[in-house]
Image (cartoon, rainbow, N blue to C red):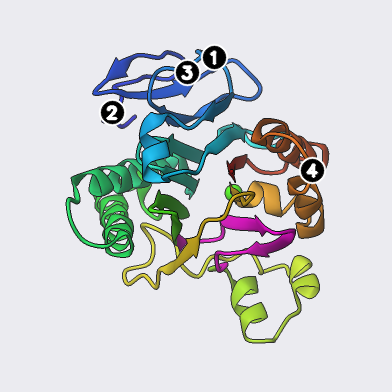
């Protein structure tokens, strides 16, 4: 197992190094699998984290407040959780990665991608958010490719990578793969990220309707993935933030199990991100839980 450079953690334990915390809980049907920073609200062996923005993020967002909740679940069919989420309120940084590959390599791919992207964003001192995010995704891509080249068991591993960075009243999206980010703005629900899948491409070209794509047998084939695609065509967007906006970052373990109208209905419910996040995960499990499922819900007020 590759050493966790951020936290020096092994599975089933928690410890702290360099201010990062990763939580894993083994022996639980639904292990926690995510990073959370800072340390103040960490609870060991819990698989759901809910928090309000600390002082630093309030400065980043000026007069806005942020509440978020992040959760991942192994689901009912998989033996390991290859999804990974990352939340850092101080940077206003939120990431979902969904790894793929045999021999647990998907788990390695998502970890390398998330860590490398975070390190790249922290190391970048200048440039626009768009440029820093592009560099972070490209760094992650190189890192996963290099790791795979150095270990036969990891050959062919890859991951989706969806990054949302809050800066100066804007949300900056950078994304590869078929994880998704949605926005609920003034009751208008929309998917912000493109799907880099065969189905996504066929919908974009008008070959399939979204409804037809749901039953497409090859629709889930990824056309771009971190660690797999040499030259990435990164989906990047800048979204102005408004009070009342809700955002959802999620893996396809949610979107393959729960329809967009159902996700929209849930996000429109009143309440804090915590019950909404819980409800989304539970809907995916109730619908069959065929895959690992991960959701981060953000609310701007
Ligand atoms: Ca998945």
For marks 2 and 3, give the CA distance: 24 Å
- Regarding mark 3 in the picture, which secondary structure is present there? loop
**Element type at marker 4?**
loop
Q: CA distance from mark 2 to mark 1?
A: 20 Å
The residue that disc 4 covers is: 269
Residue indicated by mark 1: 45
Q: Which residues are magenta?
A: 175-195
Q: CA distance from mark 3 to mark 1?
A: 13 Å
- The image quarter containing residue 189 is bottom right
Q: Residue at x 47, y 17 (%)?
A: 42
Name the residue carrying label 2.
3
Sequence-first disc among 3 and 4: 3
Horizontal arrangement in the rendering, residue 43 relative to residue 248 (left or right): left
* Place of residue 140 in the rendered image (x, y in percent of width and height, measured from the top left): 31, 53
Where is mark 3, residue-wise? 41
- SS class, disc 2: loop
x and y percentages locating residue 296 in the rendered image: 58, 41
């Amino acid at each position: 197992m590759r050493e966790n450079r951020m936290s020096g953690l092994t599975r089933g334990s928690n410890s702290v190094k360099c201010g990062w915390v990763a939580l894993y809980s083994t022996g639980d049907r639904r292990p926690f699998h995510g990073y959370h920073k800072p340390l103040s609200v960490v609870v060991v062996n819990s698989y759901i984290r809910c928090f309000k923005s600390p002082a630093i993020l309030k400065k980043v967002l000026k007069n806005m407040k942020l509440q978020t909740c992040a959760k991942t679940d192994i689901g009912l069919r998989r033996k390991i959780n290859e999804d990974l989420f990352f939340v850092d309120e101080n940077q206003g940084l939120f990431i979902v990665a969904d790894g793929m590959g045999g021999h647990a390599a998907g788990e390695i791919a998502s970890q390398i991608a998330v860590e490398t992207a975070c390190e790249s964003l922290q190391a970048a001192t200048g440039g626009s958010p768009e440029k820093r995010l592009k560099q972070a995704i490209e760094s992650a891509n190189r890192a996963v490719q290099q790791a795979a080249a150095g270990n036969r068991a990891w050959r062919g591993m890859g991951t989706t990578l969806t990054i949302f960075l809050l800066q100066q009243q804007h949300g900056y999206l950078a994304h590869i793969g078929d994880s998704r980010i949605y926005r609920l703005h003034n009751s208008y629900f929309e998917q912000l990220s493109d799907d880099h899948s065969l189905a996504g491409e066929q919908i974009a070209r008008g070959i399939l309707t979204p409804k037809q794509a749901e039953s497409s047998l090859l629709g889930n084939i990824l056309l771009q993935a971190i660690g797999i695609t040499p030259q990435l065509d990164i989906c990047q967007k800048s979204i102005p933030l408004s009070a009342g906006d809700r955002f959802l970052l999620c893996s396809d373990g949610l979107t393959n199990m729960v329809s967009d109208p159902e996700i929209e209905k849930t996000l429109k419910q009143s309440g804090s991100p915590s019950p909404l996040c819980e409800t989304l995960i539970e809907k995916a499990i109730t619908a069959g839980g065929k895959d690992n499922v991960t959701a981060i819900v953000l609310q701007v007020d």
